[in-house]
Every structure is written in C-alpha cells, then in structure tokens.
Amino acid sequence: MHEKFTKPYEPGDTEGRIYAAWEESGFFNPDNLPKRHKKPFTIIMPPPNANGHLHAGHALFITLEDIMTRYKRMRGFKALWVPGADHAGFETQIVYEKKLEKEGRSRFSMDSKDLYKEIYDFTIENKKHMENEVKRLGASCDWSREKFTLDPDVVLEVQKTFQKMYNDGLVFRGKRIVNWCSKHQTTLSDVETIAEEKKDPLYYLQYGPFVIATARPETKFGDKYVVMHPDDTRYATYKHGDTFETEWISGSVTATIIKDDSIDMEFGTGVMTITPWHDAADFEIAKKHDLPKEQVIDLRGKLLACAGEFVGMKIRDARPKIIEKLHAKGLVVKIDEAYAHNVPCCYKCNTPIEPQIMDQWFVKMENLAKTALDAVEAGKIKFIPDNYEKIFKYWMEHSIDWNISRQIVWGIPIPAKICTVCEFAFPDLQDEATACPECKSEVRKDTDTFDTWFSSGQWPLLALGYSRGRDYQTFHPTDIMETGHDLIFKWVPRMVIFSLYLEKQVPFHTVYLHGLVNDAQGKKMSKSKGNVINPIDIIDKFGTDALRMALVIGNPPGSDTSLAENKIKAYKNFANKLWNISRFVFTNTENIEIDETKITADSDKKLLQELADSTKEVTLDFEEYRFHLAAEKLYHYVWHRFADSIIEESKSILSSEDEHAKQSRQQLLICILKNSIIMLHPCMPFITEEIWHHIPKKKDAENSSLLLVEDWPAL
RNA sequence: GGGCGAUUAGCUCAGUGGUAGAGCAACUCGUUUACACCGAGAAGGCCGGGGGUUCGAAUCCCUCAUCGCCCACCA
C-alpha cells in the first residue's frame, strides 16, 4: 500500500510540488515535447492586467484555456499557450491615481517621468503576484515565451505599426469631437464610455420666434444657429439662411436659420440651437453647413469667457444661475422637471463626458473594418457561441474612427512630432526631427500615449513576433482566442483588423467567449457589494482542481455562471472520492503488471465497452468545446458508475476463489482508473497527476512518466 | 429606439427532436475490502403563458408576458 493513500487528499500538500515538476519537465514549451507532437495548437493568453490580483473571471479563463491546451497536448499536438501581462494603460493609471490620492498626492503635480517610474515599479511588482496566481491555477503555459505589453520589442513594434498606418493614410491627426473626461484629463474611445440614465430638467427657452428645448443651458451662450427640419410645416415660412435678432443670455444675438433633415420633428418643438464644440450631433450639423464652432467649456469643466459673468464657474453650479437669469429675462417658457435621458460617462469614474473638439490621433476604421467583416463572412473565423458572429458583424458595419491618443503617461508613447505653429503632426520613431516639414517651424514631441487597445490589438502578432519571428510560421494563425464576451467589441475586432492589415492573415480561426462569474445568487460580483470571491482563497480552502471543476461544470460558453462555495465544496469531495477510488484500486491490485488482454470475463468486457463509449462521447465534447458537458459526464461516470456500481460489485469478485475472474477484474479496475484519470486531467490536473504516479505502467512505457504528456485514450 | 439572451426541482444551473438531469438544501435508513469529504432509498417539475409544425417538442416555428445584458448623437 502506498503510504500516501492512507490519508485524505490534501491539495495544499501536492499542488506546489506537482507544478514544479511540470515546469522542470520543460513540456509547457512545445519545443521540448516528444517528436510525435507535430501539429501545432496555439492559444495566446489574454494578458491579465498587471495592476492587482486575479479575480474569479481570470480563474475561469485560465481554467478554460488550460483545459484546451492540456487536452490538445494529450491528443499529440505541439501545444503552445503563450502567457502575458498587460500594462493596461488607463486602467493601471487609475489604480495608481487612487493610491496617490490616499497618500494625499496627485499626478497633476508630478513630473511625468517620476510618475512613469513609480507606476512602472508598481506594475512590475504586481506582475509577479499575478504570475504566481496564474501558476497556482495550474496554467500549463510556456513561461519562457511570456510577453509583457511594455517589453522594449513590443513598444518598438507598436510604434512601427503606427508609422506604417500613417504612411498608408490609415492614421491621421485632426480636430474632431472627442470624449473628454474632465476628472482624468484625457480623451476616451467610445467603448470607454458608458451610458448612464439620468433625470434632468428639460428647459424650454424662448429663442426669437422659436421655443427650443435643452437639458444643457450652460452650453448655450454662443448659440447663433437655430435648426429645424426642412419638411416641418410649422416653420415653412422660415427659410434656410434667414437671420433675426433675439435677446439671449448675455444680450442680443443675430441668429441664423438652418434647415437640416437630421432634426427629429417629434422631439420637443422640433427646433434646436446647436453647440458644435460640445455635442457630437451638433458638430456634424455644423460640419455639414460649414458653421463656426466656439468652445464654451474648458478642459476642467469650467465656463470660458464667452459665458460673461459666469466665467470660471463649474457647469453644475452655473446651470441654476443661468436659468435664474433667463427667468428674469422672461425667456423660460416651461420646465419638464424629470426628463429621463442617457448621458455618456467615463466608464471608470462616472463623470459625465464633456465632448470637446481636440486635435487627436485617429485610425480610419471603415476599410479596416471591412476586411474583418469579409474574413468573418468568408468563414475564416468562427464564434462560440455562434450568436456572437452577428454582434461582431454589426460592430464592423458601424465602426467609427478610433481615437488612439490618451493624455496619460502610463502607456506606449506615441512617437510623433507636432509643429508648434501650423500643428502639422508626423511620426518620428528615431526622435530626430527638429523642424516642421511643412512650415519649417519648431516642433514639439507628442506627450500622449496610445490607447491600450492599440497595442493589445496586435497581441497575437506581438506574442509570436510577427512574420519575422521564429514562432510565427509555426503558430500563427493561432487556433483559439478565448476571452470574455465583454471584449467582443473592445478587443476581438481590433486583433482581427491588425493581423489582416499587417500580415494578411486572421489571428485565430475560433473565438470562444465565456460569460461573467457571478456570486451564489447570480448577482454580479463587486467590491461595493462585498460578494467578491477571491480565487486564491478558494484554492487555499478547497484546492485548485475543485475550483476548476466548479467553474467549468454547468457553465456553457457565452453564458454567465454563478459560483457558490457549496458548489466548490462538492468538487473537493469529488477529488477526495477519486483519491479513495484510487486507494481501493491500488490496494486490490498490488504487484500487478498492467495488461488489458487479461480482461477476459464477459461482464468485464461489457464494462470495457461502456468505458469506450463514454470515452468517445467525452472526447467529442472536448473536441466541440463543450467542456461543461465533458467534465460533468466524467464526474458522473467516475462517481456513479465506477465507484458506486463497478467497484461495489468488484468486492465480491475480488474476494472469490475464481482466480480467472479476479484477475480480469483487477485489470479492468486499473484500466478504468487509468482512463478516467487521463480524461480528467485537463480539468483536474493536480490530483490526476498525483494519482498517475502510482498507476502501474507497462514495462516498455516510453519517455516521461508525467500524465501531462500522456496520450489520450485511443478511440 | 434597436439587438441579444434567459424563463426547467426549494436555490444555482445543465440538457436543442425520442419515457425530465446535476450540485446544494430537505426526508428515511445504513458504518459493509476505498471514501461520513460516504452508501442505499424515497421525495420533489402540466420544462413562463398561448398557438403551430411533427408519429413524437423543454428542445423547431409564431405570439404574449416577465427578467437580464449589450448597442444608440431625440436636443
């Protein structure tokens, strides 16, 4: 009897040792796999943000990707899973700003180089913790190929891509209306804003002969254009271009009538004035009719000089005072107190976005999006579950130019120069240019950094070194991009676009999307609700294998799952069950050499056939990415067929005098145990590896004795 | 305003054409060659409502209801 099997299974005693043995074997690196592993299988890990600890969502994706990798490795593939860490630009900067705030400091009073250095140290420290946590989850990724999104080669490649896109006319700098967060003092892309439903008063104001409705009177100081639909019969007597004098907030203005069919005749009075500097829709109208634009609110969210006596006031404070003044002038017609509308806000701090016209770098998306759309329509990329294909396509059909510059220090610098006189901007990777090529004036270095998705979008290429890298030929396109369904917009399309643009290949042929991990009541985990489950605490309590099973079973692709301690405990019990099954089998098969040909009893042959059927079914589930079913079927087979039934009936056979039947049954037990352990390995890598070492091997058993690289059962 | 998804046992969820499943909870009994982190047994569901297709529907189609998520420049 093996000493170890006299005690219950203790994951804490085994997992660290087993992981070390795997790492030492070198088999996480596909170059070290036995020669029979020929066909490549590749997953690039979505790099976790190196700014904190792993959460349940990380645990889920690492589990799923590890299952895929281990399964394919055992099926004889040259399996590569590339780990990574993301500097996570804006996200990390915010985490660090909160830290500064607690210490009574602010980034706005710091030298940018010092700030960068501090965040760098902070990130590197967190990166180490994060990597250790990934290891504790059992990830069989190739650490020798690990990438960090601020590695010097990554930075250089990303900057080169910027230059190439500029040369190809796909990147430009221009004055556009952008999303401005006045708290974080940076622009944001559209996917970095969230629509908050707010109830604000809607003011109906007299504007010459018209009544206009607005929720933002504080932007209206400079409004000189009043817009209505050309087909609106109520205003048929007014002609496009007509002007009139009217009393307004700070005195009399000359207003011009504009007819534009983007106006909704049903809303309010069907008439509005426009504020092109602070409203995207108004901006479009102004652009169409070539109207002037005037800034009313500064980057700190305060009113500018055109606001007259209100100058310098925060918009929130100014609003009631402005209304007061308009009242006094008799210009307020009526007020709808609770007008419900959606206000775009910063997705991190919920500050209402203040649209501003600013010079920023943009990527022209239309043609690039078309290439991604074509690739998906040509069937080059499949989605699991497949309804995400529709969502992806919708997004590609409605893409707008992408603002890639951020006014934060934490990120990859945009390698560009900007003319201090004519504002001409151009890439300068070598940092050589001192004069503007257009007007010969002095240039300044661009201090902005890239949107983190500009680098993350090239992740599969960066991880494999583009077509110039040693791994690219073998492993690109990769097989699966496994990520959260919330990244279907933010990330997935950008990777497709960059790979198609830079290397004319799709980055992956399958996109597997997982859902959210919710709490036991199915509610979203959040720090404020206090229902966050920390995966490392769970591992300490129940073991990694139990956590992994709990995350996988009952969790089909695309849908959210709920994680309860009870559920995890159930799989800890399963691990223990497996342990005790092994104990039973080993104590009853001591000194036996494995030989399946000795399974001769008819009843045993039937059970062997049943095992073969289950194997086939489970294998198909693995092939089709139905890990939730594969794991559940294995669980059920091992516990309720093997333990409850087969082992129970074995007790009498093993104690009988019929040596022939006994021998057949002993071989059967080992055979079932062995196959079960192999098939459970992708889901429960630690305990299966531990048990594997005690399974009798054939005399001619080749190479390593690690289950990690054992062949999957023949079908 | 558009799109997507969900609605199955007390709870959390699987199950996509062939006599309803798991985990947890609750009930009864039981220490026997592993395991009480256990076993045996029983209980629990007109599979959201209605209509249709089919020999047969939780599963496919239509419709309604409720919930959730995503997208969207009605000022």
Image (spheres, coloured by chain):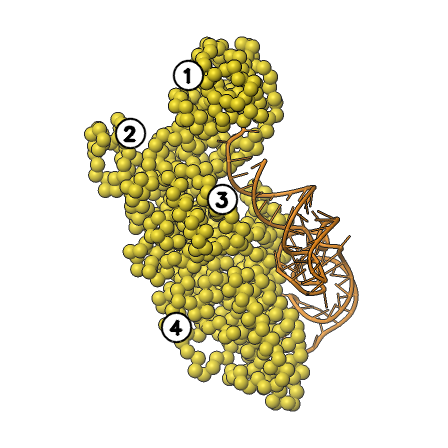
- Residue A538, horizontal then vertical, whole percent: 55, 56
Give the drawing colour for chain A.
yellow
Distance between the Cα atoms at labels 1 and 3? Answer: 42 Å
Q: Given the image, on which type of amino acid does mark 1 rest? A: Cys
Q: Given the image, on which type of amino acid does mark 3 rest? A: Tyr
Chain letter, disc 3 residue: A
Badge 4 and badge 1 in a common chain: yes
| N-terminal-most mark, 2 or 3 | 3
Distance between the Cα atoms at labels 2 and 3? Answer: 36 Å
| N-terminal-most mark, 1 or 3 | 1
Q: Secondary structure at mark 3?
A: helix
Q: Which residue is mark 3?
A: A394
Distance between the Cα atoms at labels 1 and 2? Answer: 25 Å
Badge 2 and badge 3 in a common chain: yes
Badge 4 and badge 3 in a common chain: yes
Q: Given the image, on which type of amino acid does mark 4 rest? A: Arg
- Residue B32, horizontal then vertical, whole percent: 69, 77
Q: Which residue is mark 4?
A: A36
- Marks 4 and 3: which is nearer the front? 3
Colour-to-chain, orange? B
Q: Secondary structure at mark 2?
A: loop
Q: Which residue is mark 2?
A: A423
